Amino acid sequence: LAGLFLGRIANFINGELLGKIVAMPGEPAPWWAVKYPQEFLDGHDCAALMTHQQAQERELAIEGIIHRAGYTGDVVEGYKRVLEKIQAGNVELARELEPWISARHPSQFYQAAAEGLVVGGVLWILWKNPRKPGVIGCVFLILYGALRIVTELYRLPDAHLQVQRVLGLSRGQWLSVGMIAAGLITLVIVSRRNVPKLGGWGQKRTVAA
């Protein structure tokens, strides 16, 4: 669970698994929204939601930023180098680029909180009391799958997939449906087993004299 939490934080730092757009470039954005300069290189770039004129104006502005940063030639490679400068602490470049980037849901934080903190907290509470072997694993599958379905509502599906949604759900959400089903079926099987329960961390321990 700590790995899931830290993995999502790493996704945020790297600008991966972008959230849905809440404000286009130039529009006022909520205080909690985040701008990812990596979107220009991503298959979910906001230009796809713009008119041709707006997209062209944005592209020319970004090319101008790249040239002023001292790079000519391939736009993609130049933009990557601009990102490297921004990540190294170039505030001026970041300010120039900011008006041309969309504001998005910080979906990585949503998933970090749900998959790491919420799931971990619930399992820790369940671990307090005696339970049959396998119950914790089943609850993990059910809870993780349910929360993944919810948090994926704020995240864009992987851009490289040819079919990004089936019946309105992303691949991650369908896999989560499978996890929930597997967890429920296994939980029924586990609960019917005639085996002793495992002790929880909240049980008093006795020490032999």
Image (cartoon, helix red, strand yellow):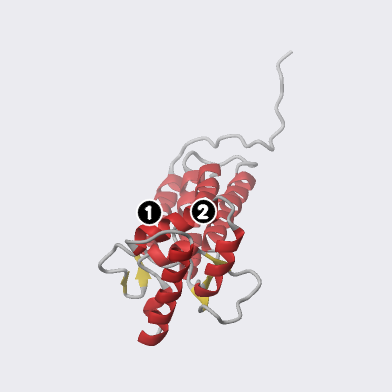
Q: Nearer the viewer, residue 4 or 156?
A: 156
Q: Amino acid at mark 2?
A: Lys
Q: 156 above or below 137?
A: below
**Disc 1 from disc 2: Cα separation:** 47 Å
Residue 118 tag number: none
Image location (x, y in percent) of residue 136: 51, 44
Of circles 1 and 2, which is in front? 2
User: With 69 as the anchor, is 173 left or right in this view?
Assistant: left
User: With 75 as the anchor, is 144 left or right in this view?
Assistant: right
Q: Which residue is mark 1?
A: 182
**Secondary structure under badge 1?**
helix
Q: Measuring 65% from the left and 36% from the top, which residue is drawn there?
A: 201
Q: Nearer the viewer, residue 18 or 26?
A: 26
**Secondary structure under badge 2?**
helix
Image location (x, y in percent) of residue 160: 30, 62
Q: Amino acid at mark 1?
A: Ala
Q: Earlier in the sequence, mark 1 or mark 2?
A: 2
Is the C-beta separation of discs 1 and 2 under 8 Å? no
Q: Measuring 54% from the left and 67% from the top, which residue is drawn there?
A: 35
Q: 153 above or below 72?
A: below
> Neighbour class for label 2 at 10 Å: few (<14), some, many (≥20)?
some
Q: 35 above or below 53?
A: above
Residue 85 tag number: 2
Q: Nearer the viewer, residue 28 or 90?
A: 90
Quadrant of the snapshot with the C terminus: top right
> Neighbour class for label 1 at 10 Å: few (<14), some, many (≥20)?
some
